[in-house]
Amino acid sequence: MSADRSSLIPALQTIAARLRMESVRATSEAGSGHPSSCCSAADIVAALFFGEMRFDPRDPQHEDNDRFVLSKGHAAPLLYAAWAEAGFIDRGDLLSLRRLDCDLEGHPTPRLPFVDVATGSLGQGICAAIGIALNARRLGSDYRTYVLLGDGESAEGSVWEAAQAGATLALDNLCVVTDVNGFGQSRATQWGHDMEAYARRWRAFGWHAAVVDGHDIGELLDALEEARGARGRPAVILARTLKGKGVPLIEGLDGWHGKPVPQGEELDRALAALERDLVPAAATPRIPPPPVRAPRPMPAPPSIPDPAYQLGDMVATRVAYGTALAALGAADPRVVALDADVGNSTFSQTFEQQHPERFYQTYIAEQVMVGAAAGLASRGAIPFPSSFACFLTRASDFIRMAGIGATSANIKLAGSHAGVSIGEDGPSQMALEDLAMMRAVPGCAVLYPCDAVSSERLVAAAAAHHGMVYIRTSRPKTEVIYPNGEQFPIGGSKTLHESDDDAATIVAAGITVFEARKAYRMLQEDGIAVRVIDAYSVQPIDASALVRAGLRTGRRIITVEDHYAAGGLGDAASDAVAAHGITVERLAVREAPRSGKPAELLERYGISASCIAAAVRRHVAEEPAVAVG
């Protein structure tokens, strides 16, 4: 921000004092919160919001605004106070902090228009900032992304995943400011105020690093200007601060993390001390707006060519995923792909070959891949991060946080190589809990195609769906069983075999659809008719189809899944039909598996065609079917 330093610095000092006062007052009113963490970072936030960043305070979602991510999310009252200072929030609303009827929550969530991603699980905001900075590159925008990091948070491995990714991707539009106040939650941080310990690490990762007094506005402004001039690499400003700065009761003292200043005399003394930092007649600096641009047109919903397979072709669903993803990239510039060094297995490499400018390689760092996807999604991109399904579980906390808000983040996760059907690679590579993990995320659609046609259709459906989607793909080649014109709406299913004489319903998804079809033929030879349903949409599951099938087949449903018993297809089906008195037997993997050939493993762990047929025979022998309706 261009302004006379002699007037700007006193103005920013005054703003910092007000930010501290509002943070202390709001947390005391709430009876909980983190005022000491707000006070240490108040000068940083004042310098950033009112001395450096370009944004329209009336329109926090303007696509060319500079972006701010509060990675140390427990300092949320400071963020809210800054937006009140900018005029977007009424100051009186700050006193509603943490109330059930107020969106000013204990940690920031995207319910607020100036919050791009939920933070508070430490080590995540900086990963999202990677994605937000990448989005500026995608748009050709010159907005910059700033992220406020905590020193205690810097122990998180995901911070250093982000440091590596930011340097590798040469994100010179990204600036991290670390609030080095010397204390974590329970004790002094591991490096305390050893500023060079921080600087050495960041420089080793290839960042431009500057060390400043975090309570000296002039030094902060100089460092921000220097960061803006860095080329070819991101910048970090390491700001030495005091926790609880400006409040004598807590300044520089341990034991005050997450504790408000008690109301009464102690609060009065704290506010009086902060008032002394107000500079009389300090002018309020003008926030420069983002550059004026013609509005970017909103692309139409993507439309991709129909699949082009022959019935009976043998194609792995992971290969079809890559084909569809590349087609989406050609149809919609918002579609981007991220991968964690397994693109030749997930087949996201097909997208990379055709759209390299929108393909982001994070290497073997699944947390930053998913975090960056959340950042990209927050700014209007449609990201498809891909990895082995088992390795996505490493990023489960990032996925959980992306589900926080009015709606889940618009991320389309793809996990390949799921279940024991991958074979000889063994249990460390077999995702057997991924469906449960993704079903637990509110609003997340969970899709499990069985063939190439359903894969391509569901990838397109995922892109059009607003909210998080998980697509589970398989390693083995499977037979194309659907015609190219078949449609697969999210929430639907396909009934592959049915008759008026069906004695039970078999519900399968993905790889087990083919085992269910084999079981159908085996049972036909015994004179037993069964219904077979491909539940390609595990969540939301096609409840009406399952209930109808269950009532018509003696209230017997047998689910079969290449997944552990808890939380997967069987539980989804049971939830859907339980109120109708329909019994669900779950055939699933019930112990930690081992290496072997796929067919051997399906048999050993009870999810092969012969196991399905045996379960049906057992039910039929126990009690004759009685169809209803």
Image (spheres, rainbow, N blue to C red):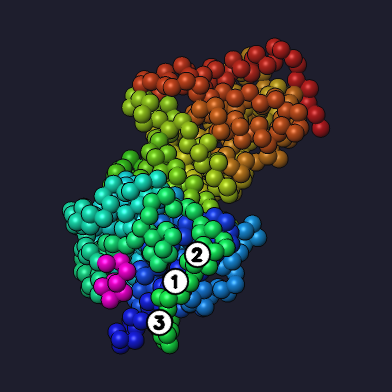
Q: Name the residue tied to disc 2.
A: 24
Q: CA distance from mark 2 to mark 3?
A: 19 Å
- First along the sequence among labels 1 and 2: 2
Q: Name the residue tied to disc 3.
A: 279
The three-letter amino acid code for the residue at tag 3 is Val
219 is within the stretch colored magenta? yes
The three-letter amino acid code for the residue at tag 2 is Val
Q: CA distance from mark 1 to mark 2?
A: 10 Å
353 is within the stretch colored magenta? no
Q: Name the residue tied to disc 1.
A: 274
Q: Residue at x 29, y 63 (%)?
A: 239
Picture coordinates of residue 222, whole percent (x, y): 25, 75
Is 543 on the left or on the right of 426, as rendered? right
- First along the sequence among labels 2 and 3: 2
Tell whether label 2 touches label 1 (CB within 8 Å): yes
Tell whether label 1 touches label 3 (CB within 8 Å): no
* Residue closest to the eye, 101 or 357: 101
Q: Residues within 10 Å of mark 1 (few under 14, many from 20)?
A: many
* Residue closest to the eye, 86 or 141: 86
Q: Residue at x 25, y 66 (%)?
A: 212
Tell me if residue 471 comes above or below residue 53 in the rendering. above
Is 413 on the left or on the right of 561, as rendered? left
